[in-house]
Amino acid sequence: MGIEERLSRLERENRTLKRGFLALALGAVALVLMGQAAPRAPQQPALIPPFLRIKRLEIIGDNGVPVVILGQHKSFGHVAVANPLGRALVSLGTTRSGKGFVSTYDGGDTRLASIGASAQGAGVVTTYNAKGKSQIRIGDSPKREGAITLYNQEGRVKTRWPQD
C-alpha cells in the first residue's frame, strides 16, 4: 500500500468521523430542544371544600337554559329536571305541609303523574289526563282506608273502590 492510498483512506475516515460527530451533535441539540418542549408536570388539584352551602344550584344545557335545578322554596327542598326549553319534566321535593312528593310533567305545564301523601299522611299515587285533571288515584279514602278512585274527564269522582 502506497502513501497515496494510505492518505486517501485517512481522508475518508476523517470525513466519516466528522459526519458522525456532526450527527451526534445534532442529536444532542435535538434532545435539548425537545426537553424544553416537554409537557409540564400536572399541577396540584384545587382544594375541595368540605361542603358547599348555597340556596340554589342550576346545571345548564349547551343552550344556557337550566336543565337541573337544586334549590329551596320557602325553606322546603326542591329538585327539578327540565327539557332543553326549560320546561319541567320531573319535580321532587316537599309540600307546604312537609310531606315528600315526586311529579312528572309533559314538557309543558301539565302534570302526568305524582307520588306523594294525602292530607292524613297516607301514601298516594295519582295519574292525570292530558288536561291535567285527576284520572286515577290509589291511596286512602275519606274513611282513611285503602282505595282506588277513578275520575271523569273533568276530574270529578266517577267511582271508588271500595264504595264509601
Image (cartoon, rainbow, N blue to C red):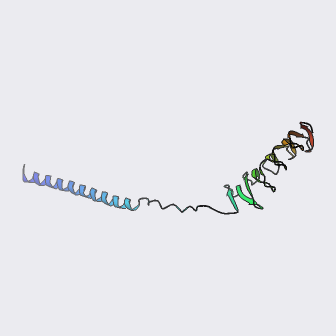
> Which x, y percent locates residue 20?
24, 55
> Which x, y percent locates residue 156?
92, 44
> Which x, y percent locates residue 34?
38, 59
Between 113 and 67, the one nearer to me in the picture: 113
Which residue appears at 72% of the width and 59% of the height? 71
Between 73 and 112, the one nearer to me in the picture: 73
Which residue appears at 87% of the width and 46% of the height? 133
The C terminus, quarter of image: top right
For this view, does 34 lie left or right of residue 95? left
> Which x, y percent locates residue 136?
85, 40
**How many circles with numbers are drawn on the protein?**
0
Q: Among all residues in the image, which is located at the extreme top?
A: 162
Between 28 and 136, the one nearer to me in the picture: 136
The answer to which image quadrant residue 39 occupies is bottom left
For this view, does 9 lie left or right of residue 97? left
Q: Among all residues in the image, which is located at the extreme left?
A: 2
